[in-house]
Image (spheres, helix red, strand yellow):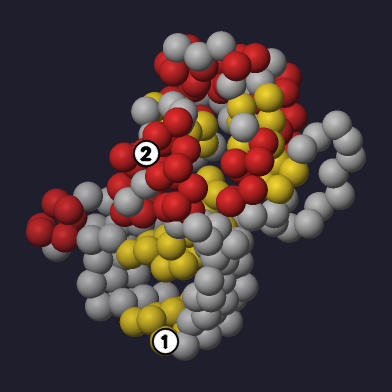
Amino acid sequence: RGQDSAGILVFEQCSSNWFVRNSATHSGDGFFLYAGHETTQRTGEGGCNDNLLDGNDFSHAVANAIEATFSGGNRFVRNRCDDSNYKNSFEILEYLSVKYKLHIITNGFEEVQHLKLNNSGIKKYFNTITTSEEVGLKKPHPAVFQTALSKASAIPHKSIMIGDSFEADIVGAENAGMHTLFFNYRNEEVAPPYFAIKELSEIKNYL
């Protein structure tokens, strides 16, 4: 679960498999079939080919319910890809990007995260992207946030971290001296003094 990971990740050269009746909701991508680079498709080597996805639930994905790159012969049947809890994402990004400098701090592989951002069409809104692979540590380690702040030339007490993982995003950012806003779409118990929202449109009320 979470915006930095796929519910089901199928890596390069994983072919002729059946994925049937799995539940992988509220993930970054519900199902991410990562087949490497375009060269693998041109040469016929590599790729993730001839897989069957039938009757899975990939609802409420942050980026894409199903993402498949540089592969062929895959079949997608009767999968559930209901609307995301991240509705109005583009509207709030348009609003924020005019008024503020936006940056991403993400746990995940460098190449995969950039590919996801490009494919989702939101990369243009962000000035810098800091990944755990780049730093060599994962959130909530302070070094991840310190690296991101340095890249952004930002001051901690004038920065706010908005994230959907309480431990990784909120506690991690707080320990780095940043303000925080918890995107609590799972309705977790959050004690004061933490601020939380359930819809992205509510971000405007806390800035």
Q: What's the amino acid at mark 2?
A: Tyr
Q: Split into 4 quadrants, where in the image is the C terminus?
A: top right
Query: x, y percentage for residue 49?
Result: 28, 71
Callout 1: 10 Å neighbours few (<14), some, many (20+)?
few
Q: Secondary structure at mark 2?
A: helix
Horizontal side of 46 relative to 55 (left or right) equals left
Could you tell me which quadrant the N terminus lies in?
Answer: bottom right
Residue 165, image quadrant:
top right
The mark tally for this picture is: 2
User: On the picture, is 195 further left or further right than 6?
Assistant: right
Q: Position of residue 104 (x, y in %)?
A: 47, 33
- Whether residue 26 is situated above or below residue 181 in the rendered picture: below
Mark 1 highlights which residue?
77
Instruction: Tell which circle, 1 or 2, labels the residue nearer the N-terminal end.
Output: 1
Q: Residues within 10 Å of mark 2 (few under 14, many from 20)?
A: some
Quadrant location of residue 159?
top right
Q: Is residue 143 visible?
A: no
Query: Closer to the observer: label 1 or label 2?
Result: 2
**Residue highlighted by disc 2:** 125
> Is 25 in front, or is 41?
25
Residue 2 x %, y %: 60, 51
Which residue is depicted at the point 72% across and 23% down? 174
Q: CA distance from mark 1 to mark 2?
A: 34 Å
- Residue at 31% from the left image edge and 77% from the top image edge: 74
